[in-house]
Image: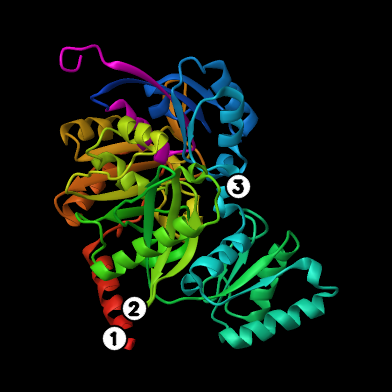
Amino acid sequence: MANGLVMEKVGVLVVSYGAREAAMIDAFTRSSNYNVKVYVADKQRNPFNLEKAEKHIVIPDLNVEAICKFAENNKNQIDFGIVGPEKPIINGVRDLVEKRTGIPMICPLKRYAIEASKVQQRLLFQKIVPEVNPRFKIFNPENYKTQRDVRKDVYDWLDELKNMAVVKPDKPAAGKGVGVWGDHFTTREQLFEHFMANFQHGAVIIEEKIEGEESSFQAFCDGKHLVPLPDTRDYKRAFDNDKGPNTGGMGSYKDVEETLPFMTKAERAKEVEIVNKIFKEWNIEDKTGLRGIPFYVAFIHTGREPKILENNSRPGDPEIINILPVLKDDFVDVCFKILEGNLTRIELEKAATVVTYKVPPNYGGYMDHFPELVNKSEIGKPVDLAKAYKLAKKFEGKMHVYPASMELRNNEIYALKSRAVAVVGVGETIEAARQNSLEGIKAIEGGALWHRKDIASKQHIEKSIKHMKELRHRW
């Protein structure tokens, strides 16, 4: 009951991949204005989603036909849908579901799924905000007859970049993925080998490697307005001190205000200005095509002009998990405003948040690097989340536990291959939020899971502050 009245019933379709969507579902079901029923099209039998869902279906490859069929079967109960993962967005889930069922979807249309082509993304920025692009060159297979010609062009470009290069395939998940000089290769031969592994699948970009500090910028969009969310900092590398391979993100933090500790207000304002410019000038007949979170931008701050490393047309994982638990507005109302085209602001609690992921022993090559730290007898055993859930209840909104790549089997929870479970700490300072996150992480037992211990640590933040001061001083 709300104000003595029966609460309005609202049905929401959630296309889910992991903890990001568990955080969305949590935000929906915490609604104080609506009686929310969630219909989840999920990658696996996520224990959190199963418990919260009115109806739950597993679609391991998240193919859009199966998602659409699920929506069709429940269309009389569903008011709108929201999509977290990029694959269904790239494959046109909104186009298909809206056409066949009339259910309005919160995510960009297929043609605005900007991460589908890194080449198109760079060319779009070149047209609207060329200053955000690092120096880059596009290599297209159809322009070359022999490998020798390709090698010559690549090496000539490396001469110009003094080898400080990043190799990116045009399409996501084609070939070997992104490779960075100094991380994935230290010789031109290694770089070229990586390049060719991608080149056989299609176009490849070689960009200048930029030195700086990264921030993740996200904005809600209703088609008419762009509402920026506070900046977050993501930890891509697997191991402490930013060592090891890149991952989907081992954790992230958000400060009390909208900037990060190493950024100035002017640097934040510049981000907002850049993204607004892209939004306004992108040649779109109907901007409702960009509804959702069309701008999840990885900025790198150089001390001078910020550069854009990439943009995605979806909420960040983990970065949106820093935002949803401290949303003051009802998330259902936010979604309705997005659909109506009248979302002009968003209110958040004045709080810092820290997300830490616990992941399986093979993730990021941990077992190969640190075999002595892995409890071998725990591998493949169920994971116990009960203590962490109990603790989260006790912490009253200062801690949230969101299962990700986990599966419920015969009333037991097992970690799968990817990031297993996220714990969000909320606090008056980053350090207080971090301690709350780590308390929850410690309470999760079994499965030989591990985590980075330095997410949002004072040392890591101080290092970023110092680095930015040095970079600003250079200019």
Task: Please tell me which residue is depicted at 20% across the width and 36% down the height of the picture.
Answer: 397
Based on the picture, tell me whether residue 5 belongs to the magenta stretch: yes
Label 3, label 2: how far apart the Cα atoms are: 34 Å
Residue type for callout 1: His
The dot on residue 434 is: none
Nearer to me, 194 or 444: 194
Based on the picture, tell me whether residue 130 belongs to the magenta stretch: no
Q: Which quadrant of the figure contains the N terminus?
A: top left
Label 2, label 1: how far apart the Cα atoms are: 8 Å
Q: Position of residue 147 (x, y in %)?
A: 81, 75
Q: Position of residue 330 (x, y in %)?
A: 27, 32
Residue occupied by mark 3: 111
Residue occupied by mark 2: 303
Which is in the foreground here, disc 3 or disc 2?
A: 3
Q: Position of residue 348 (x, y in %)?
A: 22, 44
Say which label, 2 or 1, has the lower sequence index.
Answer: 2
**Considering only vertical position in the picture, is 182 above or below 21?**
below
Which is in the foreground here, disc 3 or disc 1?
A: 3
**Considering only vertical position in the picture, is 52 above or below 214?**
above
Q: Is residue 27 visible?
A: no
69 left or right of 200 in image:
left
Task: Please tell me which residue is depicted at 62% across the width and 41% down the height of the picture.
Answer: 91
Residue occupied by mark 1: 473
Residue type for callout 2: Gly
Q: Which residues are magenta?
A: 1-30
**Considering only vertical position in the picture, is 452 above or below 203?**
above
- Mark 3 lies on a secondary structure that is helix
